[in-house]
Amino acid sequence: MKATGFISLWTLVSLPCAPLANPAEREDVVKHAIKLHRGKGAVIAQRKQWVLESCRKLSGLLRQKNVVLNKLKNAIRAVEKDAGLSDEEKLFQVHTFEIFQKELNESENSVFQAIHGLQRALQGDYKDVVNMKESSRQRLEALREAAIKEEMEYVELLAAEKHQVEALKNMQHQNKSLSMLDEILEDVRKAADRLEEEIEEHAFDDNKSVRGVNFEAVLRVEEDEANSKRNASKREVEDDLGLSMLIDSQNNQYILTKPRDSTIPRADHHFIKDIVTIGMLSLPCGWLCTTIGLPTMFGYIICGVLLGPSGLNSIKSIVQVETLGEFGVFFTLFLVGLEFSPERLRKVWKISLQGPCYMTVLMIAFGLLWGHLLQIRPTQSVFISTCLSLSSTPLVSRFLAGSVRGDKEGDIDYSSVLLGMLVMQDVQLGLFIAVMPTLIQAGVSTYSSIFKEILRILILIGQILFSLAAVFLLCLVIKTYLIGPYYRKLHTESKGNKEILILGITAFTFLMLTITELLDVSMELGCFLAGALISSQGHMVTEEIMSCIEPIRDFLAIIFFASIGLHVFPTFVIYELTVLLFLTLSVVIMKFVLAVLVLSLILPKTSQYIKWIVSAGLAQVSEFSFVLGSRARRAGIISREVYLLILSVTTLSLLLAPALWRAAIMKCVPRPERRSST
């Protein structure tokens, strides 16, 4: 007990004194610590003498600190009462004294925090990894808080320096008369200072105490230029503008989204270089695919593979590229809706509604069966089955681009059925994204709460169905009363100037997208409905708008398919090629067979021949499985291995889709229509 108490006393005394000593004294302290811990070295009398001297040093420093604090308080009061000082000089001096006060208090707190940490470590069990992990976490939190405080102190010092400059300028202005130009510039300077104070949001101070906000250690990395001397001034400018990259401990990379000073225009040069590189490399890749008879979209995917993490790794702003690529999906679905008139939708709405629902239910049933045999959790089986049940709307839209739309009397056009079913799958996608949080909670819930989770899922489904009803009711109102006058106004104002027409159509598309997003329905559905509403104005309107929007769609679609290539990993596919080919062929065959079975039950007898074409169009996996898979992996629904399998199977199924589509077209479509369909 005496030895333990003595070591604890030494801990409380020696640790705070060590940082305050010179290097020679620090070495002596370390030697004393080792000898005392091992029970060797000096005799008890020497140990007591050393402890007493350390206590005197610590108590002397604390008394000196209190004396200095009292002097600082008196100095602050004296400065505030001094009538000979200007407001700027008072502000500078008081600010400087307050910063020094805070520095003294923080230094004292750091000493006792270190003592507490060492005491906790000595009392712990060195064999207990959990205890050491908790101690490490607490030290990490303390270091983060200390870094934040130091950062705030540095900012305050910058503010004090600014106040000092203000005070010096004020003294100079008092000692000399200003010219008219100097007075104007001084007024402009003050107005600029007020502007900066007004537009500054203080986002750091406002959010650091918000619940759920964590302090993180990040690295600030400057761009590595080949000629460092030539680009030194450029780097200094970029550092001042805040254009460097931040990397956290989880290897996530961040770029500037909103600068502190909004008066200076900035550009993300990494993003600009990425888009330029994708645009240049997409041309030869697209040409190559055209030469060998593949759709150009695969050339754009290859472009993304070459530039992405599995290739040259030259794309820095991956998230920004993917975000821009999403607009390619929006405009693609808008043009799909533009070609898909409400009359045709009304003709196949039963098939479009029943087909995807039956296929999804069957896919989930097969998934649960295989999951039970392979001992996979039901939550994971349901998620994987739902992902694989979706098909790619942009891909099929490319297949159908320019195909014949005329129906035979009494027959149903295969393109109408196919697009209707794909649109319904997009609705299911929005429904599944809305239900996913509940699915995540169900995966970690106990059996006693399963009923509550099922009830919550049913309530969410009811909300989505209500939202869908509200969306279609709104579309009916827009078609009846608004879309006609709106387009006529745009057409009148845009004579000789297509900008107004393009802007008006784009704004309407984004309005529908926003409405469906606010109602918790898929944004893609809003784009499709916008095109369908405009197509109700007639064939001439459709042709005019399509000629304006198609170039925009084509460029953004290149970015979208290139962003898919960023998530394709050829090395993983090569390593597991046998397994992936087996899984991909199994999924494609299963989706094709299920689609044929479902369509055989719901199609009229006169239109049974189109089931082969529609089934071929549905026998691949949607690129949105990338989005769903990434969310599920972050939520812990699926593992990293399953996520990579989903990505690889999706990619391979998209590569097989053109061959299956051409085979179905060659077998089922007459020759005149076949040429325009392919």
Image: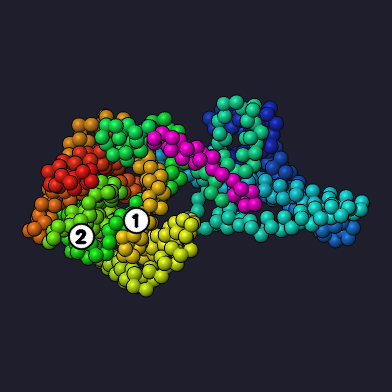
Q: Would you say residue 272 sits in the magenta stretch?
A: yes
Q: Position of residue 74 (x, y in %)?
A: 81, 56
Estimate how packed mark 1 is, as few (under 14), some (14 to 19) or many (20 or more) residues with alpha carbons within 10 Å.
Answer: few
* Vertical side of 566 occupied by 551: above or below: below
Q: Secondary structure at mark 2?
A: helix
Q: Position of residue 21 (x, y in %)?
A: 69, 34
Q: Would you say residue 129 sits in the magenta stretch?
A: no
**Count of numbered labels shown in the rendering:** 2
Q: Which segment is the magenta one? A: 259-283
Q: Amino acid at mark 2?
A: Ser
* Vertical side of 473 occupied by 526: above or below: above
The answer to whether residue 208 of the structure is visible from this angle is: yes
CA gap, disc 2 and disc 1: 26 Å
Q: Amino acid at mark 1?
A: Glu
Report which quarter residue 111 is drawn in.
top right
Q: Residue furthest left?
A: 605
- The residue labelled by disc 1 is 543
486 left or right of 446? Answer: right
Question: Residue 352 bears which disc, if any?
Answer: 2
Q: Secondary structure at mark 1?
A: helix
